[in-house]
Image (spheres, rainbow, N blue to C red):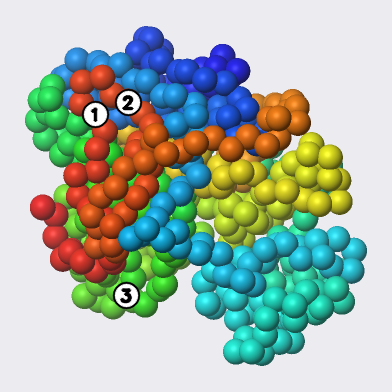
Amino acid sequence: MTTLARDALASIWQHAGLPPEALGGVSLSGSDPVFPSSFAVGAAAQSTIAAAALAACELAHARGTPRQQVAVDMVHAAAECTNWFSLDGEVPELWDPISGLYRCADGHVRIHANFAHHREGALRLLGLDPDVAVRSDAEAALRQWRALDFEDAAAGRGLVVSALRSFAEWDATPQAQALAAQPLFTLERIGDAPPMALPPLSADQRPLSGMRVLDLTRVLAGPVGGKALAAYGADVMLVNSPKLPNIAAIADTSRGKLSTHIDLRTGAGQADLQRLLADAHVFVQGYRPGGLANLGFGPEALARARPGIVAVSLSAYGTKGPWAGRRGFDSLVQTAMGFNQAEGEAFGHAGKPRPLPMQILDEATGFLMAFGAAAALWRQQREGGSWLVRVSLAQTGHWLRSLGRVQLDAQQQALRPDIEPYLVTTPSGFGQLRALRHSALLSRTPAAWTRPSMPPGSHPPVWP
């Protein structure tokens, strides 16, 4: 199955237009299954992480340094994609009690309630008081709903809910048909500009040293992508609104980043972001479609303000089809696209949907964002122009499905890899953080997070 990961990496690399000779510097070890799944989650993790690391190194080569070897072990890569961490010895509870899968009158729906406004909205849609309702109340109320009706009603209110589908049911939807016509990611030139003059780079510096990245993302793919760019040496500035909540995983995904508060609803906040943009090389965003464009920070506006910029845009369901504007998270996309139903069937429980063993759509998409940023910077150095990279959780899901299925025996269904060898403990602004080391091993300039993760707003909106 290492051949599968290598073929997947080669396909990603080729689609971005990067030099094929660089692939000779990659070593991939291990094979699926490495976690209990009937999908090639190990190959998905390994190939996207290797792509991100190798693209960073190839950009460094374009900046005048020798190529270096990149090695990725599949078990380590998949373990990294579990996003496991603890703070001061405690593992945070990552799911709100209302989040999860529910039985309806004719099927199932999954509710994502980790943000208070999504939780309250879902409960109010069910006719429940958010201040007193518990999960059993939601279970009783949902038995009166048809699954697709509740999904549509929730989407109409901007909530995040998905009906459970089989692959066949998903494939019959207009959104699935729109996705099938799209590649895993798109990388396009959106404006004219000369090649940017990049800071000098020495052979002993990490490959993205001197690169400045604005990270306007929150859950979970975008922060993973920004964290990868930071591991390869970029100065990553996480930009949060002081008025929006975050999830507990920010303690892990902020490793290596600066973290500032900017309120883009104010003139002062927009001016702060414009000043940061003037010296940025990459602008990454994961807000709802059109959200930042309405504030003057859409891709075309970025290209006018900072010619040569690389913009990376994340969405849930892609830019085409009737769901292009719909919100979504990994767990919901898994449910909608058929993965949970198929995984349950593979484990012999057709009536018991089963999630994938990690949020691999988030994780793989995050590493594709890091890959796309480095690949577009490489193209910018050769061709000039401003560039736009687009990824979505659903496009990654479509790709994961295309990698094929893994046959599991009873012992493999109970796999529980030991992640202890891959854990490190570091101080952070959230407490003592124990989390996964990065799985891409660079032969000359090891990946590292040299800045501790800090709470939002810990740094001023100024580049170092």
Residue 307 image point, x, y percent: 25, 45
Residue, x 61% and y 43% (percent of image)?
357
Single out the mark in the foreground, 1 or 3: 1
Q: Secondary structure at mark 2?
A: strand
Residue 204 circle label: none
| Amino acid under disc 2 | Leu
Residue 420 image point, x, y percent: 42, 39
| Amino acid under disc 1 | Pro
* Real-space CA distance between mark 1 and mark 3, rounded to the nearest whole angstrom: 34 Å
As drawn, which residue projects farthest toward the right?
106
Report if the CB atoms under discs 1 and 2 are less than 8 Å apart: yes
Task: Name the side, left or right, on which 420 lies relative to 397.
Answer: left
Where residue 241 sits, quadrant-wise, is bottom left
Q: Residues within 10 Å of mark 1 (few under 14, many from 20)?
A: some
In primary-sequence order, the first of circles 1 and 2 is 2
Task: Name the side, left or right, on which 312 lies relative to 75.
Answer: left
In primary-sequence order, the first of circles 3 and 2 is 3
Q: Secondary structure at mark 3?
A: loop
For disc 3, the marked residue is: 242
For disc 2, the marked residue is: 441
Report if the CB atoms under discs 3 and 2 are less than 8 Å apart: no
For disc 1, the marked residue is: 446
Residue 322 image point, x, y percent: 69, 56
| Amino acid under disc 3 | Pro
Residue 155 image point, x, y percent: 67, 68
Residue 154 visible in the picture: yes
* Real-space CA distance between mark 1 and mark 2, rounded to the nearest whole angstrom: 6 Å
Residue, x 48% and y 41% (percent of image)?
81
Q: Say above or below: 383 vs 88.
A: above
